[in-house]
């Protein structure tokens, strides 16, 4: 089975938003073992949508559209597809009722008459209920093709993929794909690929693909077979070899993020964490608390964006005066201050210059010091990220703190200098 | 001039990443008045890339590819396009030297021999230097089409759009498009569209389009003409009418975000801000410090994720005991404590249940209290976001605090209850 995704929305072609829906649909289809060979994006234009449908009908067995189901007048997908595939749009009272119900449940918006236009759906279709919004989706079969329509807002589309699309398509697929993703921190993509190239070239099924993310990379091992068990059997030996080759740079398999690994390691060992952030401005605390259940391990954080705020936390004034706000000594003092202030087992201190402007001193933009205190020792990393923009400097600084926490918490080589006590 | 974007990468079809490059290229092209009617995504597969090129050659004057220029063996774009358009790939020593230079400048990765394969480029092309990575891009003319190739990593692609693509294409465009975006907080998309529908239907040039974002929406007014001045003249009367209709729900025109508006308002009035966050876990501080120059107005923040941390900040123990951690009284006490602790003119306090799990009490998940203290009064908003997931609850909670800060700072109706002192 080959599928093609057609995303409809002029805002995508104007570059106002990225195409998150195509990503989410593709991810779900690959789990089902359904190949996706093309994504197409068209504007809110009937003629060009029809031309995309003509091309897709030649290339795919399953055509999935996202977007253009909303309540506004420029939402043309339903009418165009119904017309193209020869289906009448009819009013579905049960859908109208669930739309009314949705507006009874939320106080943030008033229902408008045009919301009810969303109750018009192709005759004889399977309705996909929208749990996060008002526009329902649907699926039907026509001229040997499976046609599915999903709403554009990514939250609504993603929820409908899980509740409607996956059940609908599961019945159609004859094989399954299973993947394992190994997350790597501290190695660049081409360095990893250099190490693994012979293996990648020899592999056919399972396949191995490297993906770069901000300051991180991951390796996705993917197997296709008739059962999930068979997929797992095929991947197991490769998984072992890869983890063996990557060593402690591989921070997890099938984990969401460094922060998730840290929260799990802390809770598993009953330890706690706190932080004092300067240039990252709360990003480290935010990432830790992105993880549901972080409250069991995260005691608190201070965004000490000023000298006064650093002193309130307990950073000695003379440390800041003698060594400067952006210095290894101040980072270490911030970590120790957060450790004592919050009474945590581990505490991170981050100070640096995220830029784009400097601070008037001779410290170059991109200089960041990341410290981790455990009450006995302080570990320190010195970063020079002159090539990176503000956002990337902040992300890397927070990630370095998380990698340091992960390593110290589970007893690996911290890969950092020991900086006094 | 019509352009089409072809993004190459199996990771896009597997749903590992969203197509950020197509968004960034489209945004730049629309500023240049170049229409983009289609995006296509294909995998790292020569045959399917060729078929996408055949379709694009029929539909577009400008073909822009993103991705597949990397150092790894599955990067096929250059070879395939050079072959399709009949150009030889030749070794460019100056490119090779800039790749060596790049690796001399960064300590984070070692150069590998396959990096130098990136110095092979089509004969007679215009080279686009890569300021953030090693893979150069290029542009050339063939069979009456302009063909541009850009690297896949979004940071590299975006930088190259500005430094290479915009100058290259500016010469080709005969008209310009200018846009103004009005940012709106506190009104849903269909409510806004209901208010503005008659105007939208009547408008042709400029056009008006609504875009929904998380807990926000924006209206993009776009004019096409022969000069930027003419575009501005065409948009001015509409801009006035729109701002008039939206009132204080419109928080800015051509501004990046609520946080940017807040930082600008604070610095303009010489006032300062601090915050105490519970369920948002640092997101509010992070968003404020996303803005370069925030240090002039933001004194600091505390992520008081535990009762102990709240008390360290100065939240009275009996307030928490009597009313509970998630209560209007605790939010107000957090705002007042942050106000006094950091000595800021304004301070926000946020407490709530982001979920997915509850806290054992009878407080429903999605309950959030947002308070803002100015030293004399405390303004409070009570939110019930039961329908939202953890991430969205946190974003909305932080946005409500920012909207409250914006309104109080510039003297608008706070749209919040006054809650004791």
Image (cartoon, coloured by chain):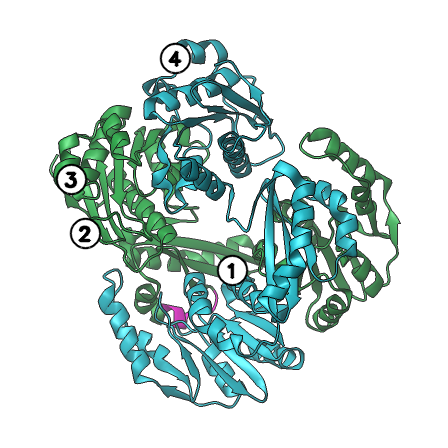
Chain colours: A green, B cyan
Q: Are marks 4 and 1 in contact (CB under 8 Å)?
A: no
Q: Which mark is residue A329?
A: 3
Query: Cα distance, mark 2 to mark 4?
Result: 43 Å
Q: Nearer the viewer, residue B189 or A23?
A: B189
Q: Nearer the viewer, residue A164 or B345?
A: B345
Q: Badge 3 sits on which subunit?
A: A
Q: Give the residues in magenta.
A: A199-205
Q: Residue at x 27, y 41 (%)?
A: A350
Position above or below: B75 against A217: below
Q: Nearer the viewer, residue B406 or A329?
A: B406
Q: Which residue is mark 4?
A: B316
Position above or below: B274 against A35: above
Neighbor class of circle 2 (other Cα within 10 Å; few <14, some 14-19, many 20+) is few
Identify the element where label 1 is drawn.
helix
Neighbor class of circle 3 (other Cα within 10 Å; few <14, some 14-19, many 20+) is many
User: Are discs 1 and 3 located on one and the same chain?
Assistant: no
Quadrant where the N terminus of chain B sits is bottom right
Q: Which residue is mark 2?
A: A362
User: Are discs 3 and 2 located on one and the same chain?
Assistant: yes
Query: Cα distance, mark 1 to mark 2?
Result: 36 Å
Q: Residue at x 66, y 81 (%)?
A: B58
Mark 4 or 1: in front is 4
Q: Which residue is mark 1?
A: B20
Q: Quadrant of residue A5?
A: bottom right
Q: Residue at x 32, y 31 (%)?
A: A302
Position above or below: A187 against B98: above
Q: Earlier in the sequence, mark 4 or mark 1?
A: 1
Q: Where residue B159 sits: x, y (%)? A: 42, 65
């Amino acid at each position: 089975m080959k599928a093609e995704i057609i995303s409809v929305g002029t805002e995508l072609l104007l570059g106002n938003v990225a195409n998150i829906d195509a990503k989410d649909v593709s991810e779900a289809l690959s789990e089902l073992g359904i190949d996706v060979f093309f994504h197409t994006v068209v504007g809110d234009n009937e003629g060009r949508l029809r031309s995309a449908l003509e091309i897709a009908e030649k290339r795919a067995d399953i055509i999935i559209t996202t977007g253009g189901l909303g309540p506004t007048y420029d939402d043309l997908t339903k009418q165009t597809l119904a017309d193209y595939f020869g289906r009448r749009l009819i009013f579905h009272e049960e859908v109208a009722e669930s739309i009314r119900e949705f507006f009874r449940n939320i106080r943030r918006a008033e229902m408008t008459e045009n919301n009810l236009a969303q109750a018009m759906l192709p005759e004889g279709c399977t309705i996909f209920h929208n749990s996060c919004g008002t526009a329902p989706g649907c699926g039907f079969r026509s001229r040997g093709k499976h046609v599915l329509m999903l709403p554009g807002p990514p939250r609504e589309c993603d929820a409908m993929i899980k509740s409607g699309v996956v059940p609908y398509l599961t019945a159609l697929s004859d094989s399954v794909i299973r993947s394992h993703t190994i997350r790597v921190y501290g190695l660049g993509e081409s360095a990893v690929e250099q190490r693994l190239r012979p293996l990648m070239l020899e592999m056919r099924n399972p396949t191995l693909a490297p993906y770069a993310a901000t300051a991180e990379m991951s390796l996705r091992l993917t197997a296709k077979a008739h059962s999930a068990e068979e997929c797992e059997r095929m991947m197991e030996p490769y998984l072992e070899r890869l983890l063996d080759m990557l060593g402690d740079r591989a921070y997890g398999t099938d984990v969401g993020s460094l922060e998730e690994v840290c929260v799990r390691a802390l809770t598993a060992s009953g330890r706690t964490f706190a932080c004092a952030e300067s240039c990252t401005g709360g990003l480290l605390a935010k990432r830790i608390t992105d993880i549901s259940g972080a409250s069991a391990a995260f005691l608190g954080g201070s965004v000490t964006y000023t000298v006064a705020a650093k002193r309130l936390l307990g950073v000695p004034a003379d440390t800041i005066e003698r060594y400067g706000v952006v210095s290894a000594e101040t980072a270490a003092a911030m970590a120790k201050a957060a450790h004592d202030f919050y009474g945590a087992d581990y505490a991170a201190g981050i100070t640096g210059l995220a830029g784009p402007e400097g601070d008037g001193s001779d410290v170059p933009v991109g200089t960041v010091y990341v410290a981790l205190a455990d009450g006995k020792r302080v570990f320190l990393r010195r970063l020079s990220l002159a090539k990176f923009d503000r956002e990337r400097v902040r992300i890397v600084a927070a990630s370095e703190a998380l990698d340091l926490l992960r390593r110290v918490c589970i007893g690996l080589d911290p890969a950092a200098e020991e900086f006094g006590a």
